[in-house]
Amino acid sequence: MAAWSGDARESEGDRQEREHFWRVVNAFRYYRAYALERVRRAERELRALPPAHRRLLRDAALPGHLQCVRARVEHNQELLHDIILGTAEHMFENKRYRPLALEAEPTPATAFDMDKLKSTLKQLVRDWSSEGQGERDSCYRPILNAIQTYLGAASGHSGSSIKSNGNSCCDGHSSNGSNNSDGCHQNHRHQQQQENEQQQLNEQQQLNEQQQLNEQQQLNEQQQQNEQQQQHNHKQQQQQRSPRVLVPGSGLGRLAWEIARLGYSCQGNEFSLFMLFTSHYILNRCHEVDSVRLYPWVLQFSNTRRAWDRVRPVLVPDVDPSALPPGADFSMSAGDFLEVYSLDMDVWDCVATCFFLDTAHNVIAYIELIWKVLKPGGVWINMGPLLYHFENMVGESSLELSYDQIRQVIVQVGFVFEEENECVHATYTENERSMLRYIYDCVFFVVRKPALKSECS
């Protein structure tokens, strides 16, 4: 149970964690006030125009469009409330927070937190919509292909079906074991004997039919038990034999989910509560394709080609997140990568990082821990740019290394390069209808932790 202010047992770390939790919850709740203030600003600018200019915009129906923006904002707020109301209180196994009091007014959130929240809505498009498929193909597909190449096919990924035993029940015509029909053609038999024999046959047939029903019920129960046992065995075999893949900085979880769908044992790790709340909502509470509607671009007032593009809907998820193969081993962990896995040593067969290295205060610490957690012979697969997150943040340390410097550290730590491509074009949470697009020239590489010291070059 999480401690509250005034509890003498609460450590400074716990206090900071609790305050951060409620700060993120508050940001989810503050979205409406934040967004509607932006709409009111646009309305004020419209009213301040000279009458002649307003007449020129009459056919553009700008006031009506802003009303449409308001309605989209209200819809997004309902979604954000749904995410935190059914998720934030229950998603952590080792923490329990007090019930959310949504009747209280949220307090103004920082611009930083609101930017994070708006980015989270766009992340839903990237990870869980059909519109984001192209972006996923450019970023995730090379990683998935490399995992299959270097780890081989996951055990049990053939998807072998569970077969019934195929034994058919007796039809009652041969189970008696005695031939009583000859008596029907003997002239010296008395009528009474025939009636007695017929009665015996009827009784025997009833017994056979009851026996068949009992046998069928037993077969059905046994088949159900066999299926349950096979599924249990399949999961145990996967956990024992399937290569284990760790995905630090997993965001909303799509890459980790895709790896688990291939049959590998996979765990995603994420630090951001914005991402954790939303990924928990998608992965655990959305079971119908395109069942959730959101408006991720509604506050994008610049570089809009058509007014409708700003208020168009996006549907998520494009797949059923619960539709993983039987026995799939997929999990998500919450916390700082450097802390959560600090005690792991030679545990993982693969570490897959996508747009992750530049989230570090000190990227060398990331590299060292990746080396530590990998088994000898394990591989690290990376895709991403170097847009260092803390570079211009006041009060935050940030080591900004060039790629050639990072490459030198990777080699000195002991990794051996298997593949390397320094120019892979990719986008990140792109609005496909925006007039402004950022294209990253990402670095993709596969490096191996040698199984033996003699393998180091």
Image (tube, grey):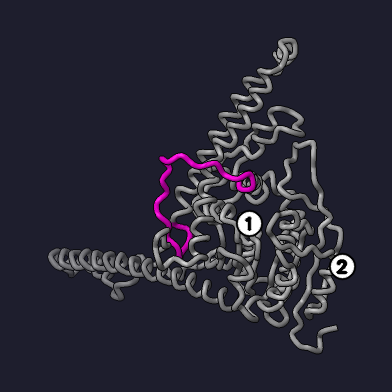
Residue at 61 percent of width and 68 percent of height: 266
In the image: residue 213, left or right of residue 394 = left
| Magenta-colored span | 90-113
Report crowding for label 2: few under 14, some 14 to 19, many 20 or more residues within 10 A (C-alpha): few
- The image quadrant of residue 390 is bottom right
Dominant secondary-structure state across the stretch colored magenta: loop
Q: Can you see residue 332?
A: no
Q: Which mark is residue 286?
A: none
Q: Amino acid at mark 2?
A: Asp
Residue beneath label 1, please?
251
Residue beneath label 2, please?
404
Residue at 24 percent of width and 64 percent of height: 206
Residue at 54 percent of width and 36 percent of height: 32
Q: Quadrant of the C terminus?
A: bottom right
Does the stretch in magenta take in 103?
A: yes
In the image: residue 260, left or right of residue 228 = right
**Vertical comparison of 396 with 264: above or below:** above
Q: Nearer the viewer, mark 1 or mark 2?
A: 2
Q: Looking at the image, which residue sits at the far left?
A: 192
Report crowding for label 1: few under 14, some 14 to 19, many 20 or more residues within 10 A (C-alpha): many
- The image quadrant of residue 172 is bottom left
How far from the left and from the top, in percent, is residue 182? Answer: 27, 70
Cα distance between the residues tagged 1 and 2: 27 Å
